[in-house]
Image (cartoon, grey):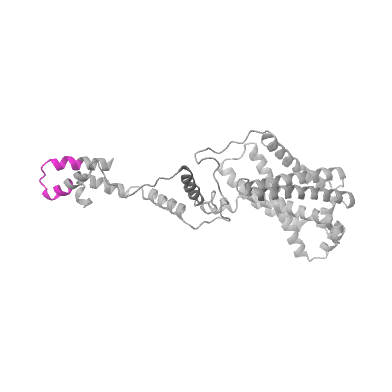
Amino acid sequence: MIAHRLGLAAVRSATKPNVFFRQNIPRMVLASAMSTSQARPIQTQKLSQEEGQQVLVNQRLNRPVSPNLGIYKMEQTWFGASAWTRITGCVLSGAAYVYFTAYLASPLLGLHVESAALASGFAALPFVVKGAIKFALAFPFTFHFINGIKHLVYDLGIGFAKSQIKRGEAALWISSFIGGGYLAFGL
Amino acid sequence: MASIVRPSLLRQTALAARCAKPAFRNNAIKASAFHTSSQRSAFLPPGPQRIEGTVNDPAPVPPPSASHGSYHWTFERLLAAGLVPLTIAPFAAGSLNPTTDAILCSAVLLHSHIGFQSVIIDYIPKTRYSGLRKIFWWGLNLATVTVGVGLYEFETNDIGVTEAIKKIWKA
């Protein structure tokens, strides 16, 4: 709109005599340049439907990945409880899958992974190592367990206020660390 | 020349426009820099992409299916909610019961299978990696069956999952 007004003002003032002579000449130049016939220095290229499609496909390949982890706050991506529920669940289930597959294959491979052999092997470890292994299993369990319940509550449509979410996250991390520590070292 | 051309009133307006909302301009500059930068802070590059139909076609709406939708969702939640008492009870009661152990193992196996399935669905999209998706999908099915047989063997020949965890934990 400003450009339009500028053009209009220039056209008007170019026709009127002006006391400031210095300003008159550029205005006349501008008014004459604002004619309807323009020479454009660029050229357009005719493309077929398929070629246009290929241009769009190539443009799409240059787009940033969405959702791009770099654009979010640290606590939303790296410490998001929902993501850690999946990670802890995969750790626990993955360990179980590995163990029971090994148990099934142990007679063929000559391994001894039955409970008696594992218990005697585990008992021989020093206290700190035992505690560390237990914590590596107990923390994922408590975290997955507590946040699993939290998500079941979310599924009922409860607890979506921002303050509730923030308090819940803090309570989740603290209680699962304490719970994991108790299961690992307290029992 | 432009500064001479502008009448004084317009010059003021232009000056005001130049000063107004620098934050908005900064954001716009940042956004355009983000969209044109070649540096991408993501774990993996985007997979091979192709456009189905023309670029103006909307995203296809999958055919509605209750067994893939609401029933599946409800079943998942019931299973998860059921696991809460199932994981606590055998350890709290402190007694060995083959039936509750079998129920717990089956529920955990199903819960794990559904969980791994959703991981595969989320991270290996069918449209971009259809071959890899098939490999992982059927690999997971094979793994779950193997683990199921392994669990059955463990329950029948060993001392049972609950008792084994207890024994190793207190070793």
The relative height of residue B99 versus residue B40 in the rendered view (above or below) is above
* Residue B45 coordinates in the image, percent (x, y): 56, 55
- For image coordinates 69% across by 54% down, the residue present is A178
Inspect this view and state whether residue A179 appears. no
- For image coordinates 75% across by 55% down, the residue present is A95
The quadrant where residue A156 appears: top right
| Magenta portion: prevailing SS class | helix
**Residue A16: within the magenta?**
yes
- Foreground of the two, B60 or A145: B60
**Residue B70: within the magenta?**
no
Inspect this view and state whether residue B34 appears. yes
Q: Quadrant of the C terminus of chain A?
A: bottom right
* Residue B10 coordinates in the image, percent (x, y): 23, 45
Q: Quadrant of the N terminus of chain A?
A: top left
Highlighted magenta segment, given as a residue range:
A9-27
The quadrant where residue B36 appears: bottom left
Residue A21 shown left or right of residue B16 in the figure:
left
The relative height of residue A74 versus residue B93 in the rendered view (above or below) is below
Count the marks: 0
- Foreground of the two, A70 or B67: B67
Residue B50 shown left or right of residue B85 in the figure:
left
- Foreground of the two, B47 or A14: B47
The quadrant where residue A129 appears: bottom right
The relative height of residue A135 versus residue A52 in the rendered view (above or below) is below
Residue farthest toward the right in the current orientation of the protein: B157
* Residue B8 coordinates in the image, percent (x, y): 20, 46
* Residue B106 coordinates in the image, percent (x, y): 80, 44
